[in-house]
Amino acid sequence: MNCDLISIGMVGEDGQNELYLERSDFRVEWCNPFVHSTVLPLLGKTGQAMDRSQLSTQVASWFLTLPRSVTIACDSITDWKLLVAAMDGIYPSNLTGRYDLRGHIDSSEFHHAVIRYHERYGPWHHALHDARAHRHGWLAWQDGRKSQYA
């Protein structure tokens, strides 16, 4: 399966640090019908797209603005591989690891928080809105864990 980064959205746990970038040089011929009908129409609304090299530079610069220890949480190994490829395989010094959100997707707290985010604020399958929704899901899941032990 051929896969290419189209856009990237990341948001810090505190909700303050966000990054959203779109690529201008992704391989359209690799896009499946779902991407053509659902993802591509969401592009081009928030700034200018950039080539892979510019995106890589922007991602690296964004990491420099973050705390000493950053863990990337994502729900897909493909997303992780695309991020690593976007960084040319060079890990920023403050990137300490990856957290797999797939185990939380079926929890009611996580799932309902993600749905509520998308219903209120933004479309599904837009990289930044998905990142924000996952942040909401993560925080809801954390709150649910705290109340279990209270």
Image: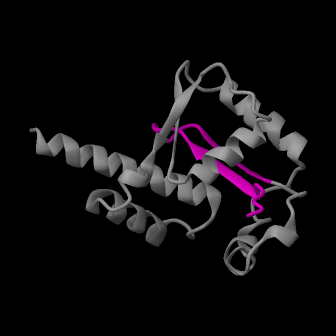
Q: Is residue 33 above or below residue 137?
A: below
**Residue 120 location in percent, x, y?**
45, 68
Q: Quadrant of residue 66?
A: top right
Give left or right: position of 63 versus 104. Answer: right
Determine if residue 141 is in view.
yes
Determine if residue 137 is in view.
no
Residue closer to the observer: 27 or 115: 27
Residue pictured at 69% horizontal, 51% vertical: 8
Residue pictured at 70% horizontal, 48% vertical: 82
Give left or right: position of 110 versus 122. Answer: left
Give left or right: position of 112 versus 77. Answer: left
Q: Which residues are magenta?
A: 1-22
**Residue 126 location in percent, x, y?**
63, 64
Q: Is residue 4 magenta?
A: yes
Q: Residue furthest front?
A: 1
Q: Quadrant of residue 117?
A: bottom left
Report the colour scheme: one colour
Image quadrant containing the C terminus: top left
Q: Is residue 106 above or below residue 40?
A: above
Residue closer to the observer: 30 or 150: 30
Q: How many marks?
A: 0
Residue pictured at 46% horizontal, 53% vertical: 134
Residue pictured at 73% horizontal, 64% vertical: 1
**Residue 84 location in percent, x, y?**
70, 39
Residue closer to the observer: 97 or 42: 97
Q: Is residue 42 magenta?
A: no
**Residue 100 location in percent, x, y?**
46, 45
